[in-house]
Amino acid sequence: MSAPPDAAFAALADGTRWKVLVRIGREPASASALARELPVSRQAIVKHLEVLAGAGLVFSQRRGREVVHVAVGERLSALGRDLDRIGQGWDDRLAALKEEAEDG
Amino acid sequence: MSAPPDAAFAALADGTRWKVLVRIGREPASASALARELPVSRQAIVKHLEVLAGAGLVFSQRRGREVVHVAVGERLSALGRDLDRIGQGWDDRLAALKEEAEDG
DNA sequence: CCAAGATGCAACCCTGGGGTTGCACAGGAG
DNA sequence: CTCCTGTGCAACCCCAGGGTTGCATCTTGG
């Protein structure tokens, strides 16, 4: 598959967003809690969580007066396997080019 | 590892860039050639190739008056395996939260 | 009921970076 | 040698989106 993982990557590309994801992967947390731990406002955190949720990387659950978020590994694992497989195929071509370069 | 793959993701996040990468993964090509195939200028292609090269995802080789670029799978595969592994770990936590939600 | 903490919206700012155009320069094809 | 083509800068445009502040709303603890 060379389908567009674009969306997922876009979600993972931002540094802050990645920190948030890893953090809630370690242990569930609310937006406010995350805002206290990271050097950004709660709203920024909220936006990141929305993006992550949109990519299916986060599961949210209302828990009393707060909303707890946790990372979903399924999608990430699937994406990871795809990348691994795609990468495998490319190495062959690379070897061919390098060889040709040395020959001629 | 929860190390920052940020850099690599940033390189993969853009749609056009991903197309370029997939394209030169299928078969080596010069920037000009790619510019003819994709709906963007050669300069845009060049910039993308620079980013990809910076992330170690592309190998370039001067071939006469043109420079041929080809995708390197190694990095991508490694990244893929990392993601898969990281994702695995998260699923446990998720299961726990869902269960707790159903109980209480 | 009342105060405190958490969330939900919305308007707004501002930089990064994807994309373009223009031009000079180099290496091949004829 | 002389065009044609592919590269290599560099200056510029423009907007998506990461980040902020302010305020209204709602739920829980007293």
Image (cartoon, coloured by chain):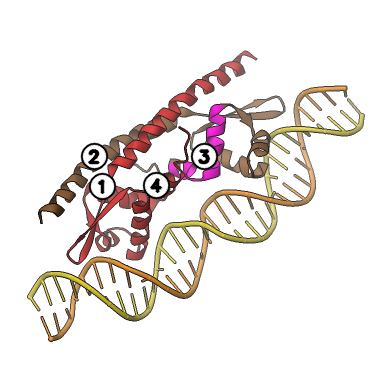
Chain colours: A brown, B red, C yellow, D orange
Q: Which residue is mark 3?
A: A18
Image mark 3: chain: A
Of label 2 and label 3, which has the lower sequence position?
Answer: 3
> Circles 2 and 4: CB distance less than 8 Å?
no
Name the amino acid, label 2.
Answer: Gly
Q: Residue A86: horizontal and vertical position, in percent?
A: 29, 39
Q: Which residue is mark 1?
A: B25
CA separation in Å, label 1 and label 4: 14 Å
Q: Is residue A61 left or right of residue D13?
A: right
Q: Which residue is mark 2?
A: A89
**Of labels 3 and 1, the one closer to you:** 3
Work out whether disc 3 and disc 4 sit on a shared chain. Answer: no
- Neighbour class for label 3 at 10 Å: few (<14), some, many (≥20)? many
The magenta-colored residue range is A9-26
Q: Identify the residue at image location x=25%, y=47%.
A: B25
Image mark 2: chain: A
- Neighbour class for label 1 at 10 Å: few (<14), some, many (≥20)? many
Q: Is residue B92 above or below residue C11?
A: above
Work out whether disc 2 and disc 4 sit on a shared chain. Answer: no
Secondary structure mostly seen in magenta is helix
> Circles 3 and 1: CB distance less than 8 Å?
no
| Element type at mark 4 | helix
Q: Which residue is mark 4?
A: B12
Nearer the observer, A77 or B5: B5
Q: Identify the residue at image location x=50%, y=33%.
A: A57
| Element type at mark 2 | helix
| Element type at mark 3 | helix
Name the amino acid, label 3.
Answer: Trp
